[in-house]
Image (cartoon, rainbow, N blue to C red):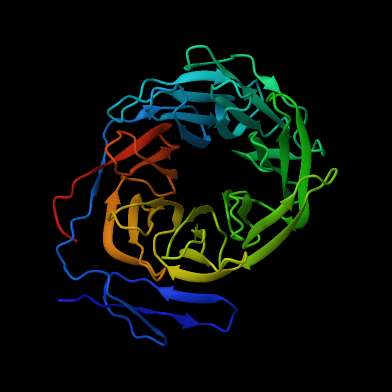
Amino acid sequence: IVAIVVASVISTGKRDTKYIPITTSITTLITTTEITESPTTSTEICYMTLINQSETYSIGHDAKSFILRDLNGDSFLDLAIANYGDDTFSILFGNENGTFQPQQVYSTGNGSYPWGIASGDLNNDTFLDIAVTLSKTNKIVIFFGYGSYDSFNRVSHKLLSACPDKRDEVRLLKVHDLNGDGRLDLLFDCNNPNFKTNYLAVALNQGNGCDYRHRDLRTVDTWDIESIVFGDFDYDGKQNDIGFCSGEKKFFTYSAINYEEVGKANYTYVEDKIHGTPQSIIRGRFNDDDFDDIALVSPQSDGLHVLLAKGDGKFLQYIYHINNSPVSVVRINFNNDSIDDLAILHSNQTIGIYLGTKLGIFSEEKISFQVGENCTDQCFQSLRVADLNRDGKDDLVLIDPITQTIGFLLSANCTKHF
């Protein structure tokens, strides 16, 4: 029996935007425009499952962000977390079986309120370094790695004020080679909560990890930048375009960026309107072309937005109405095919799996996993994906701000068919 998936695509008259209702109560939807696909010739497909781990790991208070990197060079992924409420960041070194060692705590200074955290070899000495944004002091600090791969300088190297206006707060942080010179640079945001202004800025690494040239990307006025990704959105072969979502219900992409202009970089930008306020954004390949696509969620509107790239810096947007306030989204390879799937964290303490197809259309497939109980708010947050125990399958990591712990779901071979 050949399974036929029929999705409803409803045009609203807006350019390049299509609305797709997702439901778990029916399998075939009445269509205005039919898109059909035969994803499989068998119903006996065994997907993997995810097992919520009972063991959790203590972190600091009010963690704002975390990263997964092999910080000590032992081939196992480690965790680094920015603890906003404690003026610290934590490192948890990983073990072979997907477990972690107790946290090591580094101070960022009283009243610094660390927000963003990123890692990379900033001074080209083969050791990974850690950079942290200090939101209330308008600084970025770098803790250089050294020696035995599992040590970082306790005294950080401080950059000058990250943003030119001392009233700005620096929050988000990414490490990436932005100008293609082989050196890792810093991308961050300058946020003024009083005037509701927010823009991106870069610090171009001069080679030693200590000296940087500043450039701002302030052509577009926006506020409350929530999440940032890199990709090749204009299909020029360079993974240095920037995508981000903002509180004014828009998604922006910056491409063809020229950082050589003094003071301010030149670039081409495209903006897409989003229904609701976007909160979490990722890059992926959500159909069978060669372009980098975007997915983001909006808890305000119960929306999943998939933006399929056209290859010229523009996107075709599909909007899925899903339930239970989605707060975070990650790309996951759930059914071991060539198309990226999505794992979405909801405020009701569940993670839903949305399977991708070659057409770029997602189906929910009624796959979900419970991750917590007795919570009336968005307890879990900041979902991430990684192969923690090196079994070739994607695992999930998330923060529980109520218990101040990190939790995990490890992948396993499935015990039933979907």
144 sits left or right of 35 in the view: right
The residue closer to the viewer here, 139 or 214, is 214
Q: Residue furthest right?
A: 262
126 sits left or right of 157 in the view: left
* Identity of the residue drawn at 18% across and 50% down: 414
Compared to 331, does 91 lie above or below?
above
- Asked whether residue 90 appears in the rendered view, the answer is yes
* Identity of the residue drawn at 57% across and 49% down: 229
The residue closer to the viewer here, 57 or 201, is 201
Q: Position of residue 117 (x, y in %)?
A: 57, 33
Q: Position of residue 129 (x, y in %)?
A: 57, 25
Quadrant of res 253: bottom right
Q: Position of residue 105 (x, y in %)?
A: 50, 19
Report the quarter where the C terminus lies.
Answer: bottom left
Q: Position of residue 101 (x, y in %)?
A: 36, 21
Compared to 348, does 304 lie above or below?
below
Compared to 122, does 222 lie above or below?
below
Q: Residue furthest top?
A: 147
The residue closer to the viewer here, 121 or 376, is 121
Total number of numbered discs in the rendering: 0
Q: Residue furthest bottom?
A: 32
* Identity of the residue drawn at 49% across and 64% down: 305
- Asked whether residue 192 appears in the rendered view, the answer is no
Quadrant of res 358: bottom left
Quadrant of res 246: bottom right
Report the quarter where the N terminus lies.
Answer: bottom left
The residue closer to the viewer here, 318 or 231, is 231
